Amino acid sequence: MLPVPSRIMVATTPVDMRKSYEGLSALVQNSLREDLFSSTAFVFTNKRHNRLKILYWHLNGFCLFQKRLEKGTFLIKAKGSPPTCDLTAYQLQGLIQGLDWESIPEPTVLSYQYL
């Protein structure tokens, strides 16, 4: 669904979900002090944590992914935490589904040897 970014950064402070490309881009540059054109996906939620937006640069333009949960909330770290936290692509899939991404164990990487 999404290209695999090199980094996934979640903003822990809620944002106004009326913001689109320009508004979220300004937040990334001015508040988070991050490079918009890196291969980082920036994740934002609203105050009620039932809406999520992901902004990222893909080849020649910005992409904006949006999801609204009809029931439940996206589990984002509480107040008092750093302004951002990093996720793995695996944890992001859990977050998008509304799961507790912090309790999702990383998959075990298996390695086999041909005998």
Image (spheres, rainbow, N blue to C red):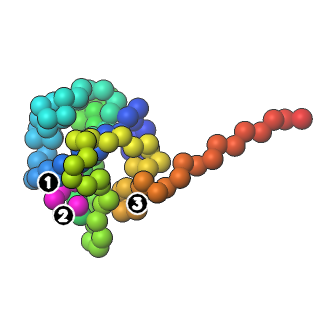
Q: Tell me the residue that label 3 is attached to.
A: 100
Kindly indicate whether the residue at mark 1 contacts the one at mark 3 (C-beta within 8 angstroms): no
Q: Main secondary structure of the magenta part?
A: loop
Kind of residue at badge 2: Arg
**How much space separates mark 3 and mark 1, taking CA atoms?**
22 Å
Kind of residue at badge 3: Asp
Q: Is residue 66 left or right of residue 91?
A: left
- Indicate the position of residue 56 as horizontal and vertical percent values: 28, 37
| Residue 45 included in the magenta stretch of the image | yes
Q: Quarter of the image holding residue 70?
A: bottom left
Label 1: few (<14), some (14–19) or many (≥20) C-alpha neighbours in 10 Å? some
Nearer-the-camera pick, 89 or 82: 82
Q: Earlier in the sequence, mark 3 or mark 1?
A: 1
- Indicate the position of residue 12 as horizontal and vertical percent values: 24, 48
Name which residue lies at 41% across and 32% down.
Answer: 6
Stretch of the chain drawn in magenta: 44-49
Dot 3 lies on which element?
A: loop
